Amino acid sequence: MLTEDMLDEVGIERRAGPPPKFLFLPPREKMFEYFLRGDVEIKVSLEELEGVLLLGLRACDLKALEMLDKVLLEEPADAYYKAKRENVTIISLDCAEPSDSCFCVALGLKPYAEGGFDLNMSRVDGGYLLEAGSERGRELLTLLEEFTEDASSSQLEERQKKREDVTKRLEEKYVVKSAAKIKEDVSLLEDEYFEGLAGMCVECFGCIYSCPTCYCFYVFEEPEDETWRRVRIWDPCLSEAFQRVAAV
């Protein structure tokens, strides 16, 4: 078994998991299919995720979902995203050991969830503090009532101290500029800088698999015997063919 201590000893960076958008906006998704048998028959493929629980999401994951929700849930809402998003229970977790690449505080976020969760967990001496963030979370706490007990004042103080300590570590070690300063620096970059970056792109599309907020997609149709299906796939804006359309 490969333990975290062994990884640290050999200097191997722990790889982050895929962003939660994989669940709600998958890389490839069948939208509907239709049958060419006399009259056209259409069968819509709306997948609802009943009984699914996402455990261990961090504040940055929740912020990414908030960004996706603004685009895909505001009217006219994306029916496919909405069907999967509505019934999933989200249990978030405070960050205790942020990685060297973390920069949430530079964007005005915290290393702990302040909203967007059904239930949040904070590690303290003796277990975890549970905090409900929605009606679904309060119902879940009721179901767990016989397995939990009221938090003590010392545990609440411990949670606050841990949150402050992690925030301070991020501010001191990982973040050298404020969000306003970063925005100012980016605004000073000339077009040639971004053209140079684009010129090195080989269109592997690894960016869209790691980015938690990319949502652009391409729609096409594919046949199988007498059945046709409409499919959508991720379509990153770095693709040379992005937004290309037929013209006369």
Image (cartoon, rainbow, N blue to C red):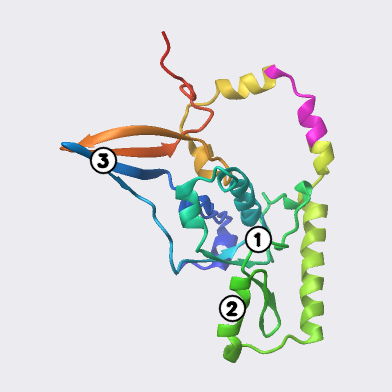
Give me the C-alpha separation between circle 1 and circle 3: 37 Å
Q: Quadrant of the C terminus?
A: top left
Residue named by callout 2: 139
Is 223 situated left or right of 198 in this image?
left
Residue at the spot 80% in from the left edge and 72% down from the top edge: 160
222 vs 201, nearest the viewer: 222
Q: Amino acid at mark 2?
A: Glu
Task: Decide: few, some or many residues near mark 1? Use Cα within 10 Å; few <14, some 14-19, many ≥20.
Answer: some
Residue named by callout 1: 116
Q: Is there any visible trace of residue 25 in the rendered image?
A: no
Q: Amino acid at mark 1?
A: Gly
Q: Are marks 1 and 3 in contact (CB under 8 Å)?
A: no
Task: Decide: few, some or many residues near mark 2? Use Cα within 10 Å; few <14, some 14-19, many ≥20.
Answer: few
Q: Sequence order check: which comes first, mark 3 or mark 2?
A: 3
Query: Which residue extends farthest front?
Result: 39
Residue named by callout 3: 34
Residue at the spot 58% in from the left edge and 23% down from the top edge: 198
Give me the C-alpha separation between circle 3 and circle 2: 41 Å
Residue at the spot 51% in from the left edge and 63% down from the top edge: 88
Residue at the spot 60% in from the left edge and 52% down from the top edge: 65
Is 159 situated left or right of 43 in this image?
right
- Helix, strand or loop for disc 1: loop
Q: Quadrant of residue 152?
A: bottom right
Q: Amino acid at mark 3?
A: Tyr
Q: Are marks 1 and 2 in contact (CB under 8 Å)?
A: no
Q: Sequence order check: which comes first, mark 1 or mark 3?
A: 3
Residue 245 location, x and y as percent?
Answer: 44, 19
Residue 100 location, x and y as percent?
Answer: 68, 52
- Helix, strand or loop for disc 2: helix
* Above or below for 188 versus 40: above
| Mark in the foreground, 1 or 3 | 3
* Stretch of the chain drawn in magenta: 183-191
